[in-house]
Image: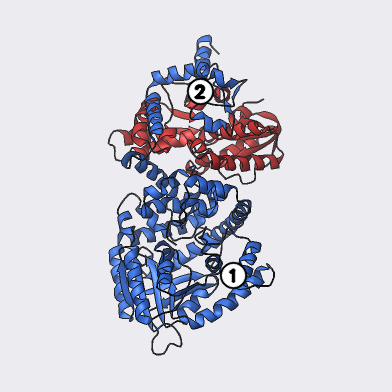
Amino acid sequence: MKVTLFATCIVDMFQSNVGKATVELLERLGCEIDFPESQVCCGQPSYNSGYVKETKEAMKRMINTFIDAEYIVSPSGSCITMFHEYQHIFKGDPVWEPKAKRLAEKSFELTQFIVDVLKIEDVGARFEGSVTYHTSCHMTRLLGVKKAPMILLSNVKGLKFTELPGKEQCCGFGGTFAVKMAQISEQMVDEKVRHVEETGAEYLIGADVACLMNIGGRIDRVGKPIKVMHIAEVLNSR
Amino acid sequence: MSMKISTDQFKERVDKGIHDDFMRGAVAGAQDGMGVKRRVATEELGNWEEWRSHGEEIRQHVLENLDYYLEQLSENVAKRGGNVFFAQTKEEANEYIRGVVKKKEAKKIVKSKSMVTEEISLNAMLEQEGCEVIETDLGEYILQIDDNDPPSHIVVPALHKNKEQIREVFTEKLGYTKTSKPEELAWHARQMLRKEYLSADIGITGCNFAVAETGSFSLVTNEGNADLVTALPKTQITVMGMERLVPTFEEMEVLVSLLTRSAVGQKLTSYITVLTGPKEALDVDGPEEFHLVIVDNGRSKILGGEFQSVLQCIRCAACINVCPVYRHVGGHSYGSIYSGPIGAVLSPLLGGYDEFKELPYASTLCGACTEVCPVKIPLHNLLHKHREVIVEKEGKAPISEKLLMKAFGLGAASPLMYKLGSKMAPAAMNPFTVGEKITKGPGPLKAWTDIRDFPAPNKERFRDWFKNREKGGK
């Protein structure tokens, strides 16, 4: 199966380890990976701040980059949710709305792709450690992917899972919210870190790099001994 | 009180909220408690999503045919001997009510809970007229005797106060001598209020839903105070937002179920009061005179526009009870009587962007509000829509942000610029990098690194790794 990887700008620039794990994992599951060089950012930072006109060029660029793919897969729930949003943003546009619809139909978040498209529930991973999992808002509420990451984690050998209290609560990232409303964001991420601590888990796992960058950044700042990992890295462990 | 409840700047209000440990504990506790109750009450129906869709349909249908139903309601209220006044502005609403007060030479007025009367600053006008105004909803009563402390929640107005604080207020203002046991406090308030109902000249209520077909209106309460407000005084004035109506009792039943389950996790509240016109010949109680004041106050401007769905709101506060921002800053931080996600959408529409421009940004767009809304208002989309309007139509975004976003738009749209930018990033960030972290970032990064570490850009970008790997074979 041919998979076109939408790595996301955060992974490309800051978390290349997540991109590598995604490629290795999908290859192991029998996929052939393609990475179009012309991919940029999905446009969320400016779109979510209200700069819709300014963002449309970036969106068009992304649509053109990915439109001929068989499957588009991304290790970020939020960025792939944005791909699904494009069709609403271009609503009424005779050229771009249909294109955006086509894009959405073949866009999948990594765990969603593995469970729903590849129909694999056990990727054969082994990971020794106690973990908890943060359910990212856009991935669960807007994209509707709730079960896939749980199914995959439950089949990882050696992994000890504890549910995160208040798991459905936002971590306080929210794109530019994290800097624009830094004071509020700090309170939100602090509560999230407290909840992670309460589980006693060694690892916090998530399927969205942005949330992990936020929670992980706070964990590091306050010096908690909790390691943060993307679910692709856990599923790629053997 | 008007819609605006503070002259402090947004940042100061938030700062106050964040440092109010008690309030934050109370809000978090209430959110967690009500969250569970709401989930149980909605799940036990078995087909909650169908209920939500039905609620949405009813509300949309009413808004699409609002002129028709308002006319039908007015005719039917008049047929039953009531008076109807349509107020385009809050001044018109107050003026009409002032006229009734003067004609009746009213001195004492009892009120049941109503957000719309807060919105139009009714109490201030009544007090100016020399009337004694008594709020009879326990929460509102507590706030009123505490020098008109503003409500911090649309359903639980005194959410920010604990029983000790309430005892202090009662002791200072009412000469209360007992303990902070809620039963004792409530009993005292009840004693104080009972005599007020009996001696009031006018009763004023809000309106949960008016029923167009019969000219009735309903009140949803847990304390029974609205029953007394509507049964004892000789004159009754009901004030309603112009969108708060349903075609028939059939739709009212659906919306009341959605409301009570979403608001407090109850199948029904203790009292659902439905009243139609003034007292008739065989009635034992009820007002001799009935006035319905229908308030527009900016609502018709929202109708037909991109924010119309906000008028679907049935004021259940489910969105407030799940909002992670409200959780940490509390209701007063919003600076409006309408707080939380619904307040952040509604306040700029009714009160203007100048007063409430920060509110649409006080959200991570996490979508928790949209997920629980019983009438499916896409709240987080409307918050985003506000941002778009602020940036593109109102031109109110800061210039530095505009430049940054323009640059971002250009950079993101051009693979070449993106590639160059991302390639240069490690060198550019080098002076700020310690190991693999940036702990003191420049420019816009500073606000991030004041709180959290930021990862240093990878020396080898993912795309370089991928390319090298392809070249070198697997």
Tell me the subunit letter for badge 2. Answer: A
Residue identified by numbered label 1: B173
Chain A representation colour: red
Amino acid at the residue labelled 2: Asp
Q: Residue at x 50, y 80 (%)?
A: B197
Chain B representation colour: blue
Residue B182 spot, x, y in % from top left: 65, 68
Q: Residue at x 53, y 33 (%)?
A: B447
Residue B175 spot, x, y in % from top left: 63, 73
Check contact, mark 1 vs mark 2: CB within 8 A.
no
Residue A205 spot, x, y in % from top left: 62, 34
Residue B79 spot, x, y in % from top left: 30, 80
Residue identified by numbered label 2: A12
Spatial separation of the CA atoms under disc 1 and disc 2: 63 Å
Height in image: A231 above or below B138? Answer: above
- Secondary structure under tag 2 reads helix
